[in-house]
Image: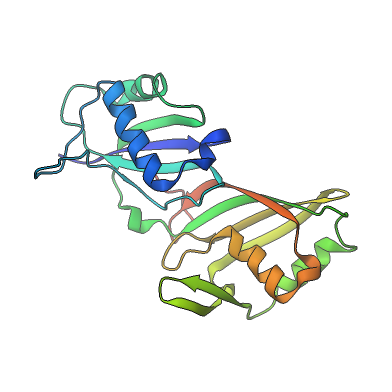
Amino acid sequence: MPEQRLLFEKTGRAIYISHLDLMRTFQRIFARASVTVKHSEGFNPRPKISIALPLSLGQESVCEILDFCLVSGSALEELPEKLNAVSPEGIRIIKAYNASRKPKDIYWVKILGQMEYDSGAPEDIEKRLDDFFAQKIIVIKKKSKSGISDFDIVPCINSVGFEKTSHNTVKVNAVITAQNPALNPENLMAALRQLSPDLAPDFTKFRRIEIFDKDGEIFR
């Protein structure tokens, strides 16, 4: 049986739900909606669901992907309404459909962000940020399971732009790698903090807007 897929949003208060807790949340959502999904085998069977590109805590998204496999019963077109009726605040199912591509085909993610400066954005902030990210090499120190390593973020950036929207706010619009390797939007801010701290904001927030394959086509 082919896998099914949900396109869903994670916004508002739900941004503080961790990835593991989000998996548990969806197990409860399916159960409360009386939607039967395939389970793993063994002594402790669990619903076989998976979420592509785990979202960092505190970030929003309107293009999250969850794969599952229906056992029987519910029609796909009825799922969003049934699941939304029992979903917590901030989790909203947009669409349910048969999956035709593997999550490994996701290559780019479009993000929107907001940078806030408590004392006001630095002078000529847009140009200075553009010049900074136009460099051919931007190496940051990145923490991983094996320790601290050097990470050049430039190959992971397809595009990045900035717009000052108020005295202390700058909007970020970027397309960055989704995986292998993934570039977390916070890595952009880490580059500023480490290499040009006078441009680093005091507060940031980010939202995933869309995901694409390697050719720039929207992934579904």
Please, is residue 55 above or below residue 46 in the view? below
Residue in the image at 47% along x and 64% along y: 182
Please, is residue 155 above or below residue 188 in the view? below
- Location of residue 69 in the rendering, given as x and y in whole percent from the top left corner: 21, 37
Residue 194 in view here: yes
- Location of residue 210 in the rendering, given as x and y in whole percent from the top left corner: 52, 47
Q: Is 107 on the left or on the right of 123, as rendered?
A: left
Residue in the image at 46% along x and 48% along y: 218
Please, is residue 187 above or below residue 220 in the view? below
Figure colour scheme:
rainbow
Q: Residue furthest left?
A: 42
Residue 133 in view here: no
Residue 97, quarter of the rendered image: top left
Residue in the image at 58% along x and 76% along y: 141
Q: Is 67 on the left or on the right of 190, as rendered?
A: left
Q: Is 215 on the left or on the right of 59, as rendered?
A: left
Please, is residue 23 above or below residue 203 in the view? above
> In what quadrant of the picture does the N terminus appear?
top left
Residue in the image at 42% along x and 30% along y: 93
Q: How many marks?
A: 0
- Location of residue 121 in the rendering, given as x and y in whole percent from the top left corner: 85, 57
In this view, the residue in front, 155 or 219, is: 155
In this view, the residue in front, 157 or 116, is: 116
> In what quadrant of the picture does the C terminus appear?
top left
- Location of residue 29 in the rendering, given as x and y in whole percent from the top left corner: 34, 28
In this view, the residue in front, 208 or 76, is: 208
